[in-house]
Amino acid sequence: MKPETPKPIQLKNYSAPAYRIDTVDLDVSLHPTRTRVLATLKLRPSPDAAKPGGPLVLDGEMMELGSVALDGTVLEAGSYRVTADTLTLPRVPDRAFTLTTETFCNPDTNASLSGLYRSREIYTTQCEAEGFRRITYYLDRPDVLATFTTRIEADVESAPVLLGNGNLVKHGRAGRGRHFAIWHDPHPKPAYLFALVGGKLAAHRDTFTTMSGRKVDLAIYVEPGKEDRCGWAMDALKRSMKWDEERFGREYDLDVFNIVAVSDFNMGAMENKGLNIFNDRLVLANPQTATDANYADIERVIAHEYFHNWTGNRITCRDWFQLCLKEGLTVYRDQEFSADTRSRTVQRIHDVRQLKARQFPEDAGPLAHPVRPSSYIEINNFYTATVYEKGAELVRMIATLLGRETFRKGMDLYFERHDGEAATVEQFLQCFADVSGHDLKSFMNWYNQAGTPELVCALKYDSRAKTATLEVEQIHGASPGASKKSPVPIPIKIGLIGANGQELPLRLANGRELPDGVLEMTKRSEKWTFRDIPSRPVASLLRGFSAPVNLTMSTTDRQLEFLVTHDTDAFNRWQAAQDYAMRIMIAAVRALRKGQRPARPDGFVGALATLLNDTTLEPAYLAQVLAVPSESDVARVIGRDVDPALIHRARRWLRKAIGVQLGDRLVEIYESTVRIKTFKPDAKSAGERALRIAALSLLAARGNPDDIARAARHFREARNATDEIGALAILANLPGPERTEALDRFYKRWKDDHLVIRTWFGFQAAAPLSTTLRTVKQLTTHPLFSMRNPNSVYGLIGTFASSNPLQFNRPDGKGYDFVAARILELDKFNPQVAARLLGAFRSWRNLEIGRRRMALRSLQNIASTPGLSNDVQEIVSKILD
Ligand SMILES: [Zn+2]
């Protein structure tokens, strides 16, 4: 019970710690219900403390304290104080001293998956953000960096493998069926990067030789029997190590690099120093069990966690407000890795889709917060799309403004200047200002202001002067707690396209040329005049999505068609097709609301046909072109009085129209795309499979019996997970015998594989059918479903709440009631996952009045429940605010 609202923690109140910890010696004796931790900390008063001296207050929770000793002398109980979350020593020496504590914790009952816990018999840890305090008493904050030595002891029988951070120093027998391993990490680190693992694990091994010729032993540890599913992850790891050397000059710094895959994990993966711990869905892959999307995710996340070794571990965050310093930057790095590895344009489309689907609604609603927030109650609530994905966009804008070479110089300086430190966003930006001479002070506004700016653009053409003038205004709407905002610097990458589709040279009135096409906007409104423009051009704005903004410009259907077919920038051709589809669906929603039939989308479909016939475009790109914006995308753009049922109908109508009008061409694409005999996970092969399934899906939307039969055949004859699951996704949305048959067959085939069967739960939860809620409720009692396993919860309940707008937003409110009840159930043992599910309600105010009332009732139900966790309480009060 937490009767009073907890006080937020404020960035402005940051002060350096009064004590530093130089070394940590841990002796961890693993036991399922009573693990003993003996911690020896070498402390000293901090020379840069804001307030030197005073009591030593250590963080600690969910533990039993055995004893406390200062410089070897055991303290009497009266000489320290213990509360539910602290251990305080009122008096400590004014010099270096040693503190030893003995504590006990219970891994088996720890269902929060934070701290030390067991997942399918494997001891594992998760310490970010504040889990280390559940292992021992500590100054659990990122700006306390210490060198760790960890002795781990366990039963040989149940935990033959013992892993820690850094390098293995020693291992051996400890008597009575026990053994031990001692790990030493020479790099000082904050406690959130601590990890240990103990269990029955099998290893997939390899080696990597770094650019200076050092050999590193690599291993991926998984449940025995699954070693053969680690090849792709290992390959991705080696390619990541190489890429970071080539692109950023960063070399790995230990003798070993270990990855462990576990089944019960709150996040995707964790970058603990030298010992990354992964949710097994992001490690295990073979062609039968993992789709191309899974392969791409694995590659991306393996790279992401590896890249943290420099951006996060070697240079860490001063405090949790700076979380974007490691996350936004590392997401940018993993996006660049994927772009270099795959198709840059397709990768960018993928990243922008994600950003708009996940981050834009967050930024437009009650959970909006700056990339660097200024206050929080529960830090676990800030592992958000804003910190990660918008954070990455901010780094990308710096790279765009400075150019690739100068950006690299800034990164080099950052690594050189702050290695081994806990840094801030200001220090990061200063490095780029120093190498470029570019004033980046106003760039901090991007980090400090929430909300997606709107960019209102107009292009005026003067036929006598032969000039075109681009007028741009940036508009910042209010965000929670922030009505007045300052302008931000915006890189606007543009092109002007002449009547014949030729790219016009960009020459400003003052004669300056823009070879890279990037304008830098710094004021609230600005205009640029281009000269020598022979006839009225069409503007291609925000190429490559050069800034995370909403672009507003009045364009005719004709101009959009022209951009879809003529823009020389492939990203913007895709964007124009998306904008066009969006415009048509919004008009269709309007017509349907009035009981009218939507107008035929001939211009749009004609433009699509032109793209499909363009043989220079790669299949992966065409697959992206054929994927019209999602129902949630349409809801986001409509913004108010949203009726999810009308949006569903409008989108289904448009997809059917594409299927009908382009049917022959789609059949041709489906038939002609090579059926690859042996599966290869590379981007090109994946693109071919994606295009084929996109065609199959639009044909099924047409709804002829032949089309359904084709999808059912595709499912039955599938030789890999991409084809099998791709076809299942189509069939699962259509009521009928093909659906039942496919789901049954899939279940029988995969019921023993907890990763693959997750998709079976997911497709049933995502089906836009009126029976879905009933099915989902039944599935929560299925023997393969567990509320204690986050993958299970996200796969079923999360998919229903976030990927099924039609059924989650049922007009009778029962979708909301169901999800709200599950959130309350989860909150009792895993508040992080409960709070995350609650995010599905973030856009409730945009709904039409009937649904809004229903959602409000469910949210109030949650809010009025006694004993909520900080996590859920913070989110629900913001959503209702
Ligand atoms: Zn990360």
Image (cartoon, rainbow, N blue to C red):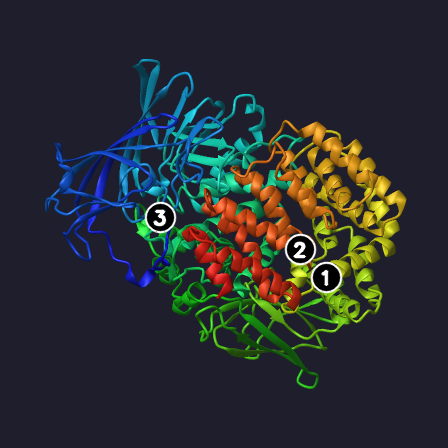
Circle 2 Cα neighbour tier, 10 Å, few/some/many (<14 / 14–19 / ≥20)? many
Question: Which residue position holds label 2?
Answer: 805
Considering the numbered disc 2 on the image, is that residue within a helix, a strand or a loop?
A: helix
Labelled pair 3, 1 in contact (Cβ < 8 Å): no
Place of residue 806 in the rendered image (x, y in percent of width and height, measured from the top left):
70, 55
Q: Is residue 596 above or below residue 379?
A: below
Instruction: Name the mark nearer the viewer: 3 or 2.
Output: 2
Instruction: Provide the secondary structure element on which disc 1 rests.
Output: helix
- Spatial separation of the CA atoms under disc 3 and disc 2: 39 Å
The reply to whether discs 2 and 1 touch (Cβ–Cβ < 8 Å) is yes
User: Which residue in the protein does label 3 denote?
Assistant: 316
Question: Which amino acid does the dot numbered 3 rest on?
Answer: Thr
Question: 836 or 232, which is in the foreground?
Answer: 836
| Residue 857 is at least partly visible in this image | yes
Of discs 3 and 1, which sits in the foreground?
1
Query: Residue 647 has which mark?
Result: 1
Disc 3 crowd, CA 10 A, few/some/many (<14, 14-19, 20+) = many
Looking at numbered disc 2 in the image, what kind of residue is underneath it?
Answer: Pro
First in sequence: mark 3 vs mark 1 = 3
In the rendered image, residue 152, in percent from the top left (x then y), is placed at 33, 26
Q: Nearer the viewer, residue 203 or 138?
A: 138
Q: CA distance from mark 2 to mark 1?
A: 9 Å
625 sits to left or right of 736: left
**Quick one: label 3 or label 2, which is nearer the N terminus?**
3
Q: Earlier in the sequence, mark 2 or mark 1?
A: 1
Residue 669 placed where, x, y %?
Answer: 82, 45
What is the distance, in whole Å, between disc 3 and disc 1 at their CAs? 44 Å
Mark 3: which secondary structure? Answer: strand
- To which quarter of the image does residue 650 belong? bottom right
Disc 1 marks a residue whose amino acid type is Ile
